[in-house]
Amino acid sequence: MVPVTVNRPARSDHTGISTMPIYEFQCKTCQFCFEEILPASREDMPPCPRCGSSENVARLVSACASQPGRKTESTCSPRGGFS
């Protein structure tokens, strides 16, 4: 179970388990794209799993789509991330 901050209520899925967003990042040093599950409050960038750089890592803008009344499922995009 994911720890919950005191100042903010936890978000949970339909099972009641706390959830955290998946962020996409790109390393500008080696051009590697990767994903991390991080709290929204985290401001520092994670290091690149390929080259170890955290100086040139940028958070990418991700889109989310869902339909009301339907269970959402992640699908893998052609470049290996989730869409």
Image (tube, grey):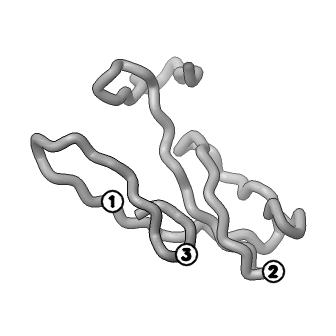
Closer to the camera in the image, 83 or 36: 83
Amino acid type assigned to the residue bearing label 2 in the image:
Cys
Residue 10, horizontal then vertical, whole percent: 42, 25
Closer to the camera in the image, 69 or 23: 69
- Residue 50: numbered disc: none
Residue 64, horizontal then vertical, whole percent: 33, 59
- Residue 30: numbered disc: 2
**Residue lying furthest left:** 69
- Residue at label 1? 64
> How many callouts does the rendering have?
3
Label 2 SS: loop
**Where does the C terminus fall, quadrant-wise?**
bottom left
Residue occupying the point 72% across, 58% down? 45
Label 3 SS: loop
Amino acid type assigned to the residue bearing label 1 in the image:
Cys
Amino acid type assigned to the residue bearing label 3 in the image:
Arg
- Residue at label 3? 79
Residue occupying the point 45% across, 25% down? 18
Q: Is residue 55 above or below residue 38?
A: below
Residue occupying the point 89% across, 63% down? 52
CA–CA distance in space, label 3 to label 1:
16 Å
